[in-house]
Image (tube, rainbow, N blue to C red):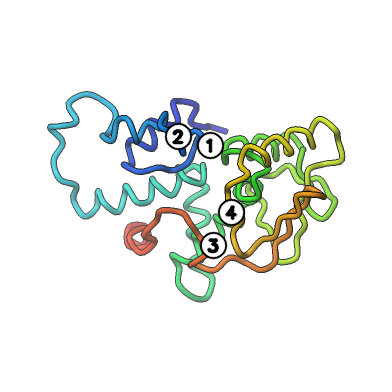
Amino acid sequence: MARYVGPQCRLCRREGEKLFLKGIRCDTVKCAITKRKYPPGQFTWGRGKLSKYGIQFREKQKVKRYYGILERQFKNYFKKAERQKGNTGENLLMMLERRLDNVVCLLSFASSRKSARQLVLHGHITVNNKKVDIASYLVKSGDIIKPKDDEATQNIVKANLELMKGRNVPAWMQLRVDTLEGQVIQLPAREDISAPAQEQLIVELCSK
């Protein structure tokens, strides 16, 4: 599958805000947004004002980059969100928030979503004591997420928990550091989602 492998900080600069793609580095003075808060590339001063379509498009790109998904995946999520009851934009964000790679990152088992995806794909994470190596797996209420019972894996997770010690776990999940165990207490609501997104703009774009 195609995957962006270029500089992560370039994506944040393009969207004009922190997407926390490099974990703890994003909270330091080394963050690219802190040093160069302008889009990458030459002649950025000559770029005009964004059109209405441009604003909607950038909002969609921002969400895709925040969660690390591709265009086809995004379209599939949007179609599912449309078929569900309720607000389409909120349904979309709640599905993306429930992805296993995102949950592993929010539990601080990994320092970034990219690292979390790697942990999942390499089979280091279990859900309800069963190995799950699909990053797009959607967690459900009551699910228990743990690293597999392997010394090397657990040492990686412990190191990340220590590194990200100041990070708060969202209210819809619970973390037990002593047993290296996270649990989904309930499905996330819109107010629980920290993604920098205006979902209505995305719905307007994708509904055309």
Q: Residues within 10 Å of mark 4 (few under 14, many from 20)?
A: few
The residue shown at (27%, 33%) is 39
Placement of 99 over or under 200, stated as above or below? above
Residue at which label 2 appears? 28
Q: Residue 111: give x, y in percent of width and height.
A: 60, 38
Residue at which label 3 appears? 94
Callout 1 touching callout 4 (CB < 8 Å): no
Callout 4 touching callout 2 (CB < 8 Å): no
* Amino acid carrying mark 1 in the image: Ile
Residue at which label 1 appears? 24
Callout 2 touching callout 1 (CB < 8 Å): yes
Q: Residue 16: give x, y in percent of width and height.
A: 31, 41
Callout 2 touching callout 3 (CB < 8 Å): no
Placement of 28 over or under 141, stated as above or below? above
* Amino acid carrying mark 2 in the image: Thr
* Amino acid carrying mark 3 in the image: Met
Q: Residues within 10 Å of mark 1 (few under 14, many from 20)?
A: some
